[in-house]
């Protein structure tokens, strides 16, 4: 079962399965690539963006962009 990255709860980890959309170069440049591990760290004070750990880096990603990153069920 896959789900968008924006549905991960803080502290939950998952493997990236696919990136949706036509222009994914920016997401790949940030480290979001198929097969990679990502962990949701925490939301901002206003709920958007969220902080994610990917490739030992913390990245802030808006919800609309996080929806384009499809992950496995989570909690690897």
Image (cartoon, helix red, strand yellow):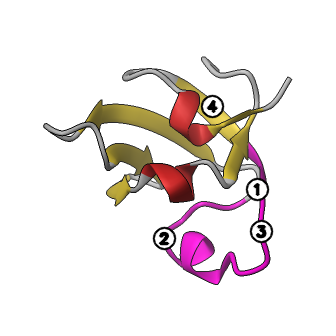
What separation in Å lies between label 1 and label 2 (alpha carbons)? Answer: 12 Å
Q: Gap in Å between the C-alphas at discs 1 and 3?
A: 14 Å
Q: Nearer the viewer, residue 4 or 15?
A: 4
Tag 4–tag 1 contact (CB < 8 Å): no
The correct choice, above or below, for 64 with respect to 50 in the image is: below
Quadrant for the N terminus in the image: top right
Which numbered disc flags the more N-terminal residue, 4 or 2? 4
Q: Residues within 10 Å of mark 2 (few under 14, many from 20)?
A: some
Q: Tell which residue pokes out farthest to the left in this image.
A: 45
Relative image position of residue 32 (x, y in whole percent): 59, 60
Side of 57 where 68 appears, left or right: right
Residue in the picture at 37% in, 23% down: 10
- The range drawn in magenta is 16-33
State if disc 2 and disc 4 touch (CB < 8 Å).
Answer: no
- The residue carrying mark 1 is 34
Name the residue carrying label 3.
21
Residue found 27% across the figure and 35% down from its top: 43
Q: Give the crowd class for mark 3: few <14, some 14-19, many >=20 residues within 10 Å.
A: few
The residue where tag 4 is placed is 14
Residue 73 location (% of width, % of height): 73, 21
Point out the tag, 4 or 3, that comes first from the N-terminus. 4
State the mark number for residue 30: 2
Distance of label 4 from label 2 (alpha carbons): 17 Å
- Quick check: is 20 in the magenta stretch? yes
Find numbered disc 2 in the image and state the secondary structure of the residue it sits on: loop
Between marks 4 and 3, how big is the CA–CA gap? 20 Å
Residue 24, picture quadrant: bottom right
């Amino acid at each position: 079962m896959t789900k968008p990255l924006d549905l991960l709860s803080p502290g939950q980890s998952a493997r990236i399965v696919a990136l949706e959309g036509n222009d994914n170069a920016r997401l790949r440049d940030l480290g979001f690539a198929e097969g990679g591990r990502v962990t949701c760290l925490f939301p901002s004070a206003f709920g958007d963006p969220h902080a994610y750990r990917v490739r030992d880096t913390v990245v802030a990603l808006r919800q609309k962009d996080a929806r384009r990153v499809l992950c496995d069920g989570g909690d690897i």
